[in-house]
Amino acid sequence: MFPRTIRAAVCVGAMMLAGADAPCQTFDVATVRPNRTGKGGGNLAASHGMLTIRNLPLRTIIGAAYGIAEYQIAGPQWLKQERFDIVAKTDAPVTGEEKMLPLLQPLLAERFQLAMHRETKQLPAYVLMVGTKGPKFEAADAGGTGLPFKKANKSGGGRIHSAHLTMPQFAEILSRRLGYPVLDMTGLAGAYRVTLEWAGENKAPKPGKTDKAKPDTAKPDPDRPSIFTALHDQLGLRLQARKAPVEIFVIDHIEKTPTAN
């Protein structure tokens, strides 16, 4: 268990970075260990007051803690390579990833001496817009929940399926799948039923490196189209490359070796 004085100090730092309204709360017990098994797959799960992280890069863990995409984190290159296992427990009545992940913020500050500040920079990005023939999807049923968005918001893969998704949420999902900022400029309000399938194994081109991100500029695999073609043909949407202001979390200090358990 963290000493009370240390917990208070790191809580204040995490609150300042996350925002004035962020709760000052962290885990009661936690173990943090480097994972030396190799690249492989990693996972994150939350249940019954426990958060379990296995074989995830520290960059991914930081992104999960602050609810930001990895492209928003500016820090040393080793953050992508160094992987960790974290098992953390809390006696507080919190369940689910959305409520438990922010509790990682003071933990990262205490165990890795993480210190960051925010900046806004102009970065290559994509803008999500409606195509010339209009959207090809239907409005969601009234009273739908946000759970499908949580399921759809994965870091990889070539399929998005949700019965209740707003366009800002859809843009956020696309940004995480592509690894670049995606801004919603569709002008479509409300929630929709969205299904999109594309060649997810193909890395998206950097915005501005293609001919304005036209559908035929990315090479699709033999069985599935590129994401640009899929958006146009399946949903009646398109991505346009441009520069955009993006909030960046700049790491001022972080230790490669966490403090002892």
Image (cartoon, grey):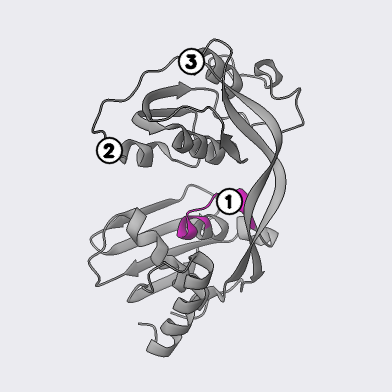
Crowd around label 3: few <14 · some 14–19 · many ≥20 (10 Å): some
**Residue 220 appears at what percent x and percent y?**
62, 19
Of pointers 2 and 3, the one earlier in the residue sequence: 2
Local secondary structure at mark 3: helix
Crowd around label 1: few <14 · some 14–19 · many ≥20 (10 Å): many
**Three-letter residue code for mark 1:** Glu
Local secondary structure at mark 1: helix
Q: Tell me the distance, in whole angstroms, between the alpha carbons under discs 1 and 2.
A: 26 Å
Query: Which residues, given as a range, are shown in magenta?
Result: 63-73
Are the two marked residues, 1 and 2, in contact with CB atoms closer than 8 angstroms?
Answer: no
Q: Is residue 193 above or below residue 16?
A: above
Of pointers 3 and 1, the one earlier in the residue sequence: 1
- Residue bearing the label numbered 3: 234
Of pointers 1 and 2, the one earlier in the residue sequence: 1
Eye-nearest disc, 2 or 3: 2
Q: Is residue 84 above or below residue 159?
A: below
Q: Tell me the distance, in whole angstroms, between the alpha carbons under discs 2 and 3.
A: 23 Å
Quadrant hosting residue 117: bottom right
**Residue 31 appears at what percent x and percent y?**
40, 72
- Residue plotted at (51% across, 80% down): 259
- The answer to whether one can see residue 239 in this image is yes
- Residue bearing the label numbered 1: 70
Eye-nearest disc, 1 or 2: 2
